[in-house]
């Protein structure tokens, strides 16, 4: 009953286009789900300065809108609706490689302004899937310029280098982590966070990010055929209803 009243007052909206959902548990709406920029199976894993990273989407279209809505307009539900896609990518490609789930935190200043940490929202969904709790292991020790305001990789690396410290070396030592963030671009942020964990004695760190910009050069035919994407979306919608 309370859920029904809340739905009337705050009708659930599509993660990508923001329209009120006709079927509240089917999010993103069918039209947006059809066009989601899912990466094909052979594009999910990438390596960079952070090590190995599973990525669910290209950072474009409805996915970019959902991430921005969460970061800048307080719509946490937008990221939660897409989290099951990252859970699936990570469970298919990184299972067995970690025993603790953690995330790349925003700075304390940003956390106060925003009220939540978007990477933690994603990490929560991952931890629930593996029947564990997300662990806060890192702290962003200094406020940095937005990485998106810096164009080249060297400037990004310099901006973020050493920005993360572990909260407790004991919590990191000897552990194998899955490190979660919303977007991985040049990988400097993920690398700085992973490096802090490794320096504190973590045995290994693998990463997962909801989206990454297209690296270019990928052959069009390597993308999943539309029929297959639709099938996957239906499965994910069922799956995401189950884990909520
Ligand atoms: Zn939509």
Image (spheres, helix red, strand yellow):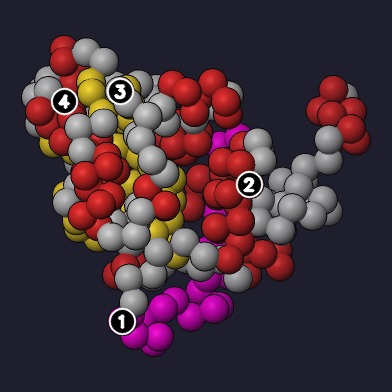
Counting the numbered discs, the total is 4
Residue for point 61% across, 61% down: 62
Q: Disc 4 designates what residue?
A: 175
**Residues at discs 4 and 2 in contact (Cβ within 8 Å):** no
When the figure is inspected, residue 120 is found, relative to residue 75, above or below; the finding is above
Q: Is residue 204 magenta?
A: no
**What is the C-alpha distance between the residues marked 4 and 2?**
34 Å
Q: In the image, which disc is placed on residue 141?
A: 3
Instruction: Considering the whole magenta stretch, tell me its main secondary structure.
Output: helix
Q: Is residue 220 magenta?
A: yes
Residue for point 79% across, 55% down: 19
Instruction: Name the image quarter holding residue 231.
Output: bottom right
Which of the pair 91/114 is nearer the observer? 114
Mark 3: which secondary structure? Answer: loop
**What is the C-alpha distance between the residues marked 3 and 1?**
37 Å
Instruction: Name the image quarter holding residue 129.
Output: top left
């Amino acid at each position: 009953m309370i859920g029904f009243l809340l739905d009337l007052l705050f009708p659930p909206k599509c993660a990508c286009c923001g329209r009120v959902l006709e079927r509240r548990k089917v999010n993103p709406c069918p039209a947006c789900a059809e066009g989601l920029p899912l990466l094909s199976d052979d594009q999910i894993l990438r390596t960079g300065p952070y090590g190995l990273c599973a990525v669910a989407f290209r950072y474009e279209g409805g996915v970019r809108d959902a991430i921005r809505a969460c970061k800048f307009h307080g719509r946490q539900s937008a990221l939660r609706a897409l989290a099951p896609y990252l859970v699936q990518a990570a469970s298919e490609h990184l299972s067995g490689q970690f025993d603790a789930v953690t995330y790349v935190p925003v700075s304390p200043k940003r956390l106060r302004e925003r009220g939540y940490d978007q990477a933690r929202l994603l990490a929560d969904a991952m931890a629930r899937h593996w029947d564990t709790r997300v662990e806060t292991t890192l702290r962003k020790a200094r406020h940095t310029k937005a990485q998106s305001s810096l164009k080249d990789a060297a400037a990004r690396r310099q901006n973020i280098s050493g920005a993360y410290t572990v909260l407790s070396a004991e919590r990191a030592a000897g552990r194998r982590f899955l490190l979660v963030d919303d977007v991985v671009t040049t990988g400097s942020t993920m690398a700085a966070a992973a490096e802090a964990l490794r320096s504190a004695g973590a045995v290994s760190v693998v990463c997962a990010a909801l989206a990454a910009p297209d690296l270019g050069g990928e052959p069009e035919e390597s993308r999943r055929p539309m029929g297959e994407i639709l099938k996957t979306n239906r499965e994910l919608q069922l799956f995401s209803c189950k884990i909520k």
